[in-house]
Structure formats: structure tokens, C-alpha cells
Image (spheres, rainbow, N blue to C red):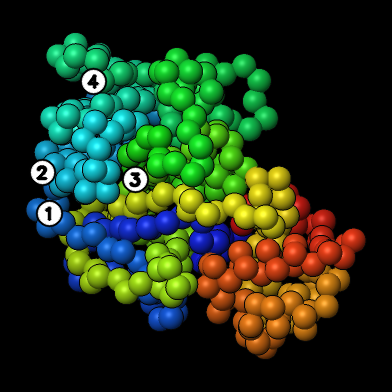
Amino acid sequence: MSVPRLMLSSLAGAGRFCVLGSGAARWKSVRARNRRGLSDLHPQLSPNQGFRDSPSWLPKNRSEPRSYITNPKLATTLVQILQKENRNRHQLFLECNPGPGILTQALLESQAKVIALECNRTFLPHLQSLRKKVNRKLEVVHCDFFKLDPRNSGIVKPPIMLSETLFQNLGIEALPWSEDNPLTVVGIFPAKNEKKILWKLLYDLYSSTSIYSYGRVQLNMFIAEKEYEEPWSSFSVYNQVGGPKKSKNKEPLEQINKQNMCFIQMTPLQNLFTENLTSVNYDIFFHMLKQCFMKRHATLMDHLQSLSPVNAVAILKEIEKDGDMKITDLYPEDFKLLFETIESFRESCRWLFDDCIEDIIL
């Protein structure tokens, strides 16, 4: 089953720029009203340059081919974007699978401190040699960021690691959720298992575990356009009065092996957790989402009657929605509001569960 197109609005500033072949981004599958609110970044890049797949000289038995940034111009553009978002020139960056280190070097030249997490031993000697040239500004660790904190695992060994061990070894301390992000993560999502990685990050975020136990960690990632449009297309940048901000124009940038990619910046909302949505009851929230998107063409009233024994008319009045509207017509913020509204009722039983979808990953 595919990931639901509408997702909870848990991240602030889900800005992106598209890396496209030709023409504008394709949004045919996204309703016009749900396309708004994205903060687009669109640097000019040379066509057909910037990324490469795993080199041919790497071991042939690698099951997870990866892409790497190989164009210095693209690396410089990314650094400019990252510095614009993070005004602290000495910001700590955690770079995922830097490969040849093109972006690593650009970050170092901007006076940033970098922790390079590289899962492929082949690149480690080069990164280690680069580390010797810069004084304490670069740390190199044999680690796969996308396999941090595996679930249901016993003893782990590099490149698989526990975030607690990794961060303790690097001297990274947790920050309160109310403060700025403790570090900035940058990388390229592996083409394999993008959906699973995205869902794991969401679970980690809402449970305040893994990297999010250290604070509001900001992710800056390249992701396939098709995956971006599906789960992230409705992440909106909301202003203080709750309305979505207008988005800038999308602009074609670059073709990567005939596959379009987007660069997204994701920072957890400072007010993500509330009295009625916490890192304790988040699993009920996720179950609500799963149950909604199992029947995505049903009306809101139908869903309310199957989700909760609480009076559906009272819920609709609280959230100011029409019961005849489709669940796919809701904004991401609406799902969060719906959950918090049901949780705010003081009935002894507030939720009905469909056990058959308990283990489904959408």
C-alpha cells in the first residue's frame, strides 16, 4: 500500500527546490488547493551535472546503490542555501554518505564543522586524509545514517549504529525542544526503501526517539520527486494566523539519470507537541491516520463514526468541518486538529481500533 498523499504537518518550512529534466514540476496527482504553501528554493544549475551513481569500481555485490554529489557548483549552491537557513557560520553539519567529499569540502570552506557518516569503507581513506588537512573541523565515522537505531535488533556493528552511542562519542548533547536545532543533517535519500525511511523518521519524530531525542534536528535531503509529491506535497508553511503562505514559482534545474529529484528542508515544529498530542499517545495518532487512508474516499462523517464513540456531530462542530467532505480534502493541520479534538473529550473511551491494520505500514 502506498504512503498517503496527505500527511500530518509536523515540520516547519518544508521548503524544496526541484532537480528536474525539462519543464516545470508535474503535479497532476495533487489537488490544486493542496499544492499551496510550499516554500520553493530554485538555484540555477548546469544541466546533466552534479550527481553520479556509485562508481563502477565499487564492489559489485552492493545491494544498495547510492548517488553522490560530484559537481562543486552544486555543492557551493547547497552550502549557500544551508547557510541562509542557518545563520551560525560554525553550525554543526552531519553529512550522510558524502562519498568523494565534494560537499564536505564546500562545507568546510564555509567555516562549518562537519561530521561525515560514510557507510562505504572505500571512501573512508579519502575522507580521513581530508580530515588531516583541517584542524578539528571534520570527524569521519563509518556509519550509515539511514540505518541508525534499527528496530528489533540485537548487537549492532558499523556501519549500523545506535544514535546514543554515536552522539555520545562525538560529544553532542541534547537540547530542549524549545531551542534551535542542535545540528543539521544533509544527504541524499537512498533510492531503495525511501518510503520506509520516511516513515521511520516520522515515528522517531513523534516518539522523540533516535536523533529527535537530541532536539529539533533539521533534515536537508534530496529525494525522488515521486516520493516528494506523495507524502510531502501537503506539508505547508503556516503563518501565525493559520493560513498557508504563498509558494514561489517552481523552476526546472537538472536531470539526474532521467529521474527527477527534489531538495527538501525539514525542521520539526516547535509547537508540535501539545496537551493532547504527546510522545506518549502519538501511536494512536498514527493509527488514526492509517485507518483514515485505508478508506481514503470515505466521508469525514463515516470515518468519525468508525474512529471514535464520541459524538461525531460534536466533533465536526469543534473542528468546523462538513461531515460530507472527503478525507483527502483535509489539510495536514486538519488531521492534527481532529486528533487533538477527539483527545480533548473526557469520555472514558475515545477511540475505536481496527486490529487488522495494526501492523500495516502505509
Q: Nearer the viewer, mark 3 or mark 2?
A: 3
Q: Amino acid at mark 2?
A: Lys
Q: Earlier in the sequence, mark 3 or mark 4?
A: 4
User: Element at badge 2?
Assistant: helix
The N terminus, quarter of image: bottom right
Q: CA distance from mark 1 to mark 2?
A: 8 Å
The answer to which quarter of the image holds residue 351 is bottom right
In the displayed orientation, state which residue is furthest to the right: 348
What number is the disc on residue 45? Answer: 1
Sort mark 4 into few (<14), some (14-19) or many (20+) by Cα contacts within 10 Å.
some
Q: Amino acid at mark 3?
A: Asn
- Residue 173's x, y, as percent? 46, 25
Circles 1 and 2: CB atoms closer than 8 Å: yes
Q: Earlier in the sequence, mark 1 or mark 4?
A: 1
User: Element at badge 4?
Assistant: loop
Q: Earlier in the sequence, mark 1 or mark 2?
A: 1
Circles 3 and 2: CB atoms closer than 8 Å: no
Q: Which residue is mark 3?
A: 220
Q: Which residue is mark 2?
A: 73
Tell me which residue sits at (42%, 56%) in the image. Answer: 12
In the image, residue 311 above or below residue 159: below
Q: Nearer the viewer, mark 1 or mark 3?
A: 3
Q: CA distance from mark 1 to mark 4?
A: 28 Å
Q: Which residue is mark 4?
A: 137
User: Element at badge 3?
Assistant: strand
In the image, residue 97 above or below residue 243: above
The answer to which quarter of the image holds residue 280 is top right
Q: Earlier in the sequence, mark 3 or mark 2?
A: 2
